[in-house]
Image (spheres, rainbow, N blue to C red):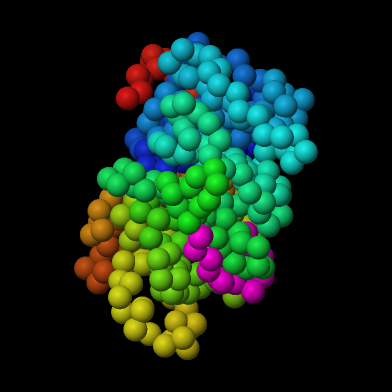
Amino acid sequence: MSTISHAAITLEQSGFTTADRNGFQMYQLFPLHYRMHEHFVPDVGPVRIAKQMGVSNKVCYVSMMNGKYSQNNVIVFNVETNSDETEITTPSRYGAVTNIQVSHNRLAVFTATRLFVYQFPDNINQIRSEDIRPNPKGISAMSYDPTTSACYLAYPGFKTGSIQIMNLNTLTARESKSPVVIDAHVTEIVQVALNCQGTLVASGSTKGTVIRVYDARTKGMLYELRRGSVHAHLQCLAFSPCSSYLAVASDKGTLHVFGIRDAEPQKRMTVLERNLGSSSILKIQLDRQVLALGFSKQTAKSLTGLVAICSDASYWRYHFSKDVNGKVHSSPPFYEELLEFSADASFFRTPLD
């Protein structure tokens, strides 16, 4: 069976990348479209992490162990020239890179105990580095608002169960504005997500039974969403671009979609009322390991669809509709084997903007 080690959807949710022992691939999210012609597959060796910068030609990747580059290197690849463009190296004493987050103006690189933030992609240079709570899986999320260029980064704080949110645009080498710290859970954070404006943050802990949504500005809890009563490992969290929906995947073989558009009434609820939890508006059975979730284009009034990228290199897209009573239903999913899809592509690479 074909497998991929990593999948990441762009911050705008327009495309995604996958990584495996043969390198990386780029796709359009919806409709599914292969963004690299088969004869232009880059010779980068086995890849562990790969993330595309928006709709640009740049992909940041990290090699697998015994790959082309060492584990503490982040390589910026230019798809247009089909070549490695820049090599960013973190000090070897901090160990391997565990995750990267990339926007149109910043690159964040995580090791297990250190965070590095770079100006990116022009005149790449390190803005700041600092110690973080041990984070061997690189749990983090980035937001980028194309209207204001605001860029935020969320990751586990030093206190167990807390989330730290950093404004990356205010960082300097000497100082940074005090980050927002939210005490979200009593156990370790395992998943975190930001909406595109960086105003909402969602998180789940090792229990995996509830997902909490907070106002990133006031630190107030808006929602406590009930995934289930049985402990589960949360695999992915993702806001829709319109911030009206939140998708959750777990190792229980289910996808949940929650509606979160009515935040104001939640603010007026008592703590007891919020703790009763909100159930999902849609539950989908998908017995696969989900690596990434994204939404196809929609507005606040119309949820169009959800895309799941799985470790077996499968692509699943679900379209939604509401009946006369307002209940959400899902049509049969569209399914595709990504590696076969890319291998069979007979058209030339679509130029990227």
**240 part of magenta stretch:** no
Instruction: Say which residue appears at 44% left-offset and 82% top-offset.
Output: 274
* Residue 40 located left or right of residue 302: right
Q: Residue 298 placed where, x, y %?
A: 28, 50
* Residue 273 located left or right of residue 208: left
Instruction: Say which residue appears at 21% left-offset and 68% top-offset.
Output: 324
* On-image quarter of the N terminus: top right
Q: Residue 201 placed where, x, y %?
A: 46, 61
* On-image quarter of the C terminus: top left
Considering only vertical position in the picture, is 182 above or below 62? below
* Residue 240 located left or right of residue 82: left
Please name whichever residue, 249 or 72, is drawn nearer the observer in this view of the structure: 72
Considering only vertical position in the picture, is 201 above or below 343? below
Please name whichever residue, 97 or 20, is drawn nearer the observer in this view of the structure: 97
Instruction: Say which residue appears at 53% left-offset and 39% top-offset.
Output: 127
Considering only vertical position in the picture, is 166 above or below 99? below
**182 part of magenta stretch:** yes
Instruction: Say which residue appears at 56% left-offset and 51% top-offset.
Output: 140
Q: Is residue 112 visible?
A: yes
The boundaries of the magenta stretch are: 178-192
